[in-house]
Image (cartoon, rainbow, N blue to C red):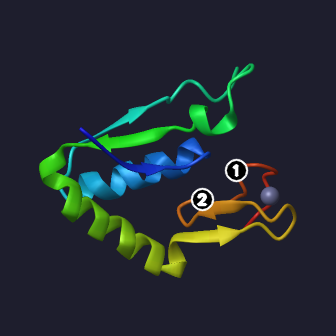
Amino acid sequence: MELVYSNDQLLMVNHVKNLLETANIESQIKNEFMGGGAGDLAPLDTWPELWIEEKDLEHAKQVIAQMNDNSEIVWYCAKCDEENPSTFDVCWQCETAK
Ligand SMILES: [Zn+2]
C-alpha cells in the first residue's frame, strides 16, 4: 500500500476517496477515528490518511492533481473562512450558507 493523500479534515480525505472511486481506484482510509481524542499525540500523527495499491499510484496522483487544479471543488466560508467541498451547501464548521 502507498499513502497518496492526507488532510486534517476527514471530509476532504473522504472527498478524495470518492474521486478515486469514480476513477476505479480502490482506496482505504487510515486514522479515520483518531481525530477526536488526539490526547498527547502531535496533530500530524492523527490526520486521516488515504492509502491505495501501489499499481494505482500514478493514476491516483493524476486524479488528485486534477482536483487541485479545479477551483470549483472547494469554496471558502464567508464567515469563518473554512474550506468546504463544492458538494456542501452550508459550511461544515459554522453552518453558514454558501
Ligand atoms: Zn463557516
The answer for how far apart the CA atoms under marks 2 and 1 are is: 8 Å
Front residue (pair 81, 56): 56
Amino acid carrying label 1: it is Trp
Callout 1: CB less than 8 Å from ligand 1: yes
Residue 56 position within the rendered picture, expressed as x and y whole percent measured from the top left: 17, 54
Q: Residue at x 34, y 58 (%)?
A: 19
Q: Which residue is mark 1?
A: 92
At label 2, counting other C-alpha atoms closer than 10 Å, the crowd grade (few under 14, some 14-19, many 20 or more) is few
The quarter of the rendered structure image containing the C terminus is bottom right
- Residue in the picture at 55% in, 46% down: 11
In the drawing, what numbered circle is on residue 8?
Answer: none
Label 1: element kind? loop
Q: Quadrant of ligand 1?
A: bottom right
Residue 88 - label? 2
Report if residue 89 is visible in the image. Answer: no
Residue type (three-letter) at the residue carrying disc 2: Phe
Disc 2, SS: loop
The residue closer to the viewer here, 54 or 25, is 54
Q: Is residue 63 above or below residue 6?
A: below
